[in-house]
Amino acid sequence: MNRLQGKTALITGAGSGIGRATAILFAAEGAKVAVNDISVEGGHETVRLIKEAKGEATFFKANVTKLPEVKSMVKQVIDRYGRIDVLHNNVGGWQRENNDTVINDSEEEWDRLINLNLRGVFLVSKEVVPIMIKNEGGSIINTITTNAYMNYVGNHAYGASKGGVKELTRSMCLDYAKYNIRVNGLVPGETVTPQWTASMESGPNPEEAKISLLKKIPMGRFAEPEDIALGALFLASDESRYVNGHILFVDGGLTSGFYG
């Protein structure tokens, strides 16, 4: 316990799923948590759950693809807590229909997915890194995805954007390590979140799809958001003080090779 005592963590997309589980865990470990989401209801619910457990959190609404909103959010976090020690760039999304291809995507849809998954990491990091430099250190965790390593049919922009996050993570590590800022990637496996469930349920045979996918996971189960949050906690804490530019897979062995 108390592995994040005295630290302030900003978590984007913390209104549900992996972001919410991470926010709750970070607060339980002593962090003051800045909860970001575009969903006011989801963000406030995360804060409620944290405060119910005697933790400290505040909700900050912002669309991470829009620089003015990001600037305002980061300023509000600093006004409230005075510092940002941990940044978890967690926002991301894909198409439910898996119809994301270079032929089928409109320019608008391509831009939406690239912006959501890659531009958001860039913009939030752009505002937070100078704060971490001033504070002489910090930990940045970028959520990537298994699609950056083994993509699925109908996920062109999604896979490309997450591949970009992978390389951005490694590049940031090279430039900011001298300021004692660690930048690592987190790769969740198939995780049961509201977004994941909605995507699975949109297909013609949801249960069949789940069974087929489950066969590819050596550990024999889907991840829960709390499983991924534990990986984020390690990368946020001083226990990973010499871990930098690393990509941590929390996928139950999904990307290790052909299975099932």
Image: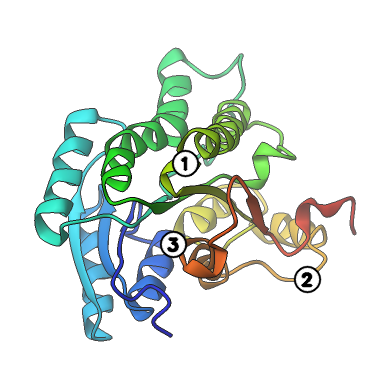
Q: Position of residue 36 (x, y in %)?
A: 27, 53
- Label 2 belongs to which residue? 220
Q: Amino acid at mark 3?
A: Gly
- Label 1 belongs to which residue? 178
> In this view of the protein, which residue sits in the foreground, 54 or 96?
54
Whole-angstrom CA distance, mark 2 to mark 3, is 21 Å
Q: Amino acid at mark 1?
A: Lys
Q: Position of residue 47 (x, y in %)?
A: 23, 70
Count of numbered labels shown in the rendering: 3
User: Does 226 appear above or below 168?
Assistant: below
Name the residue located 21 percent from the left edge and 43 percent from the top edge.
62
User: Does 143 appear above or below 114?
Assistant: below
Q: Secondary structure at mark 3?
A: helix
Look at the image and tell me in which quarter the C terminus lies: bottom right
- Label 3 belongs to which residue? 17
Work out whether mark 2 precedes mark 3 in sequence or the reverse, and give the earlier one. Answer: 3
Whole-angstrom CA distance, mark 2 to mark 1, is 41 Å
Whole-angstrom CA distance, mark 1 to mark 3, is 33 Å
